[in-house]
Amino acid sequence: MVLFTRDLRVHDHPALAAAAGEAEYVVPLFVFDDAILGSDFARPNRLSFLLDSLVELDSSLRRLGAALVVRRGDVVDQALAVATEAGAGAIHLSSDVSAYARRREARLAGACSTARIELRSHPGVTVVGAGEVTPGDGDHFKVFTPYYRRWREHPLRPVADTPGRLALPDETATGALPERRALICDPCSPALAPGGETEGRRRAGAWLAGGGGSGVDRYHDANDDLAGDATSRFSPYLHFGCLSPRALVGDVGTGAGADAFVRQLCWRDFHHQVLAARPGLPRQDYHTRDDRWRRDDDDLAAWKAGRTGYPLVDAGMRQLAAEGWMHNRARLVTASFLTKDLYLDWRLGAAHFWDLLVDGDLANNAGNWQWVAGTGNDTRPHRVFNPLRQADRFDPEGAYVRRYVPELAAVEALGGGAVHQPWKLPAEVRSTLDYPEPMVGHDEAAAAFRAARDLGSSKSRTGSSPKRRKQAAGEGQQRLV
């Protein structure tokens, strides 16, 4: 039996390949785990992508001669019941690093031992397993660059063969995938990407083969171009295992773009090895900075709604709501604004991203939020991303902002860059815009943040009133600090 979790593919699937290579019959099982369905993981965007991916997985398995067996309940109970019913001698699964995944595997190991069924764990979720690359003085790398150097030198496992043929025992009832309306009660983002291995491989093939300055060829110098949207957008397919990260490393080729892309896959592995070593990462500061975060529900709501008065920040938040995905550069800017300009707890931002991101990954979401907040694995914990400087560098003509903030689309007639500072527009133009004034002045907010970190308290930060912050919105030279 192969227990699928977030490895929803048939290509380069070590667990599936091993099972197919040693047994006449293979039972491919997916369990709708009540513990997960009852948790905050079960958000509409991810559930929709999951269902797409399972439909595709079932089709792929049927083309190979089998079918996806579907159950719902406690994952260990259901796995043992199906394995016993089919007379399986072994259960294969892909190892994972979250605290829940490790508890699940430990429980399954205990149950398999009692039932005298072998449990075999395989790689496949990351390029390099969480414990395969470690420093000499600890269980994980705390800084990315030395990890990257060792990661690049580490021998990679062979890409697993896709089974040529699978056979499902005749007596095994496959069950059925749930109806979408029975599983997803709340609306999904309207422009959500479709899930599934076929779609993931189609996108990967087109992006990796892109010539003439497109796709991976442009990645090294265009991945931060917000309007150009030159990233791979593979993250949802990697999170659900519709694409193999190991296979991508082998397929990407060579060159500056390929190297830059592989480095991003390494960042993904880096956060996974941190989470494996620090299971509390989604809730606890990796490095405490003695922050005394402000509490302001109105400021948090304005940030979530994309109504901060900073067009680049608002465009990122609107993209998240519309697509269940956000450009990585915009993720940095929006997260920095919440934690450094508004001085609100990174956990609040991580929770909102978790609610909407189709690629919501426990390791990456927590690791990247802590990196931006300065509580994680960043060697420059007090950096602040200036939203105006970032806009000037990565959306100079304002195309990204106008794409996602329609209230500002008419500003184009005044010049592309004007859209990033609407408070500087002529009064007769401002009066026609349904767009808020900046909720903070960046220079003042950045200075107050640095002072709060220096003092180990929030006194200097909370001493700045909302009115005073708004008055300072256009004052001073804007810069990345």
Image (spheres, grey):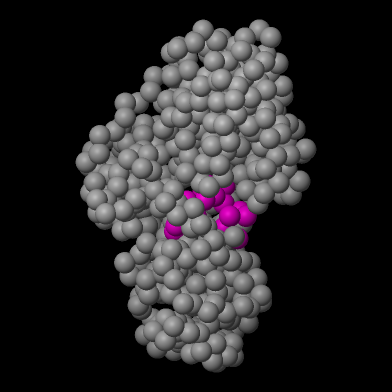
In the rendered image, residue 355 lying in the magenta stretch gets the answer: yes
Q: Is residue 13 visible?
A: no
For the point 72% across and 24% down, which residue is it?
176
Q: Position of residue 44 (x, y in %)?
A: 67, 47
Q: Is residue 153 visible?
A: yes
- Residue found at the very far front of the displayed protein: 114
Total numbered labels: 0
Q: Is residue 331 above or below residue 418?
A: above
For the point 59% across and 87% down, which residue is it?
466
Q: Is residue 457 above or below residue 84?
A: below
Q: Quadrant of residue 56?
A: top right
Give the magenta-colored segment's residue range: 352-368
Q: Position of residue 127 (x, y in %)?
A: 36, 38
Q: Where the N terminus falls, by quadrant?
A: top right
Left or right: residue 298 compared with residue 398? right
Residue closest to the eye, 184 or 395: 184
Left or right: residue 127 compared with residue 94? left
Q: Where the C terminus falls, by quadrant?
A: bottom left
In the rendered image, residue 361 lying in the magenta stretch gets the answer: yes
For the point 66% across and 75% down, which residue is it?
297
Q: Dominant secondary structure of the magenta stretch?
A: helix
Q: Quadrant of residue 51?
A: top right
Q: Is residue 396 above or below residue 144?
A: below
Q: Quadrant of residue 212?
A: top left
Q: Position of residue 181 (x, y in %)?
A: 77, 39
Residue closest to the eye, 208 or 98: 98
Residue closest to the eye, 124 or 217: 124
For the point 38% across and 43% down, which residue is it?
130
